Image: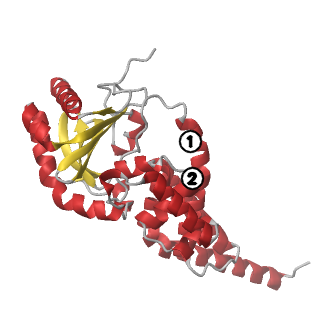
Amino acid sequence: MAGPAESAGTAETADGRAAGAEAGVAEAVRYRPLLFSIAYGMTGSVGDAEDLVQDAFLGLTRAGRAGTEVADPKAYLATTVTRLGINHLASARVRRETYVGEWLPEPVVAFADRPGGPAEHAELADTLSMAFLLMLEALSPAERAVFLLREAFGYGYPQVAEMTGKSEANCRQIFARARRRLAPGPGGRPARERATARRAEGDELARRFFAATEGGDLEALLDLLAPDVVFHGDGGGKARAVGRSVSGLRRVAQLLLFGFGRNRALGISRCYARVNGRPGAVLLDARGRVAGVIALDIADGAVRAFHSVSNPDKLAHLGPVSDLGLRPRR
């Protein structure tokens, strides 16, 4: 039986470990933007990404309290988030098999005049465009992790191997296989190169795009769309949306003019924003409630894809959600 002095010493040691663990987590908070970006790239969901990051920090806290020394908190957290993301995708894929209509990622929005929110955690949002995330949906969870870490975040193969729990040789094979499956990818260029090009050209073209759609100018709109432009819409069966993607220059242009015209009739206005690092907008009803989010995929001087998210479940993190456009409950 431990004496009073020994018990006090044990308590002091435990208290010291707890204090050290809390200090370590506080110091590691600066890695949150990177961790959120990895988790979001794996899941395509703001809420799920935040949960995975929180779980990773809880793991770091428990390790510190147990007396386990974590030599590299950044590597520990990134590895934890990656492996949690791989596990999460297994169940997420099952849920998406029963998803109503086309599935799009939950948008990460940065308002021009409203700081804060999930966007401040997205360190590499320019890389995690809607188009890039949709492309990743074709990969298995392991392929997605390897490709994302290597292509979007620039990790070396030794680091990717450590983070995914696979051998370096296996990671090289997985990456090559994933790249073959995805080639040439949106715009035909690597994600980081596409991001730089789009950032430079996107804003002015987006301004002209919104002017054409809001003015009902079909000819001006046709000049701004790529010949193989694609319209993607996600209502999740809860909001009115196109059930499947629509492609073709004139079909997409007419669909856009119809949709923007309907929004005007409903009193829905547009608030410019960056969506997943790309030019886009948040649609607001007359009461300032969020009715939808749209993102443009721009490359080579044209809009290549239009992404519209109106599923209320994917908008709630942005504020109160509008009931305009919702399907009536049966």
Q: Position of residue 186 (x, y in %)?
A: 33, 51
Q: Cβ–Cβ below 8 Å for labels 1 and 2?
A: yes
Q: Position of residue 262 (x, y in %)?
A: 19, 24
Q: CA distance from mark 1 to mark 2?
A: 9 Å
Bin the neighbour count of mark 2 within 10 Å (Cα to Cα): few under 14, some 14-19, many 20 and up.
many
SS of the residue under disc 1: helix
Q: Position of residue 178 (x, y in %)?
A: 50, 56
Q: Position of residue 49 (x, y in %)?
A: 48, 53
Q: Amino acid at mark 2?
A: Pro
Identify the residue position indicated by label 1 in the image: 93
> On screen, 184 above or below 269?
below
SS of the residue under disc 2: helix
Q: Residue at x 59, y 82 (%)?
A: 71
Query: Residue 6: in sight, yes or no?
Result: yes
Residue 306 badge: none
Q: Residue at x 43, y 17 (%)?
A: 329
> On screen, 86 above or below 16?
above
Q: Amino acid at mark 1?
A: Arg
Identify the residue position indicated by label 2 in the image: 141
Bin the neighbour count of mark 1 within 10 Å (Cα to Cα): few under 14, some 14-19, many 20 and up.
some
Does residue 123 appear to the left or right of 274 in the view shown?
right
Q: How is the image coloured?
A: secondary structure
Does residue 74 appear to the left or right of 107 in the view shown?
right
> On screen, 162 above or below 189?
below
Position of the N terminus by quadrant = bottom right
